[in-house]
Image: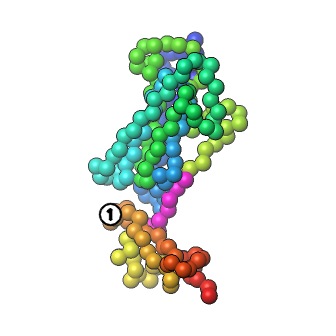
Amino acid sequence: MACYGNGYDNKTQRSPLVMDFSNSPYTLSDANQVMSIGCDDIVVVQQDAFPLSNTSSIDSCALHCISLQTPVDVGSCPGTGCCLTSISNGNFLLVKPFDTHKYWGRLSHLNHPTAFLETYNQEFMGMPLVLNWKIMGYNCTHSQNSTNYACRKNSYCIDINTTIIFGGYQCRCKKGYDGNPYLGFHD
């Protein structure tokens, strides 16, 4: 990401953030959002539910400020000096910040614009990320007769992805039962 002011030059690089869970039991949850902080910048978010398919979606988030001194609380996003973009469940996420000053030649003195995971101040030490997970391999239909089938009695199986390549499943408790569907239930 970039931090620029009077000494701004065109060589400032803004690295994209790439998350690829294609070969893991994890996927991004739709509970996540991309929060961007800054002035006069654009953040483009590209998502692929399955990287080998044509299910890519692209969204963007434009940052604007009324004043260069607009305060932004990292824990909230009132809409000025920050923007939020929702993401969908999926295996792949690319977040690319674009500096509009570089592309449109508009130079101003700005106070450290940032995007996504960049440190905003000393108190901002990280960012939570919600992941979904699955038992990798085949879907429910293919797994139920396997000796490695993970769902126990009084649980049921749900498919996480419907493709053979990215197949997987989770176990859930049947109605009326509480506990861990992978360990079984006690009366």
User: Which residue is painted at 64% across and 42% down in the image?
Assistant: 126
Residue at numbered disc 1: 163
In percent of width and height, residue 89 lies at 43, 53
When asked about the image quadrant of residue 96, the answer is top left
User: Which residue is painted at 44% across and 83% down in the image?
Assistant: 147
Q: What range is drawn magenta here? A: 130-136
Q: Amino acid at mark 1?
A: Thr
Could you say which is closer to the camera, residue 64 or residue 149? 64
- Residue 50, visible in the rendered structure: yes
User: Which residue is painted at 34% across and 64% down in the image?
Assistant: 162
**Disc 1, SS:** loop
Circle 1 Cα neighbour tier, 10 Å, few/some/many (<14 / 14–19 / ≥20): few
Q: Quadrant of the C terminus?
A: bottom right
Residue lying farthest right? 123
Up-down: is 14 above or below 172? above
Residue lying farthest bottom? 187
Counting the numbered discs, the total is: 1
Residue lying farthest left? 54
- Residue 91, visible in the rendered structure: no
Q: Main secondary structure of the magenta part?
A: strand
Up-down: is 23 above or below 128? below
Up-down: is 183 above or below 92? below
User: Which residue is painted at 71% across and 33% down in the image?
Assistant: 122
In percent of width and height, residue 128 lies at 60, 48
In percent of width and height, residue 6 lies at 58, 11
- As drawn, is 64 to the left or to the right of 76? left
The magenta stretch spans residue 43 = no
When asked about the image quadrant of residue 156, the answer is bottom left
The magenta stretch spans residue 132 = yes
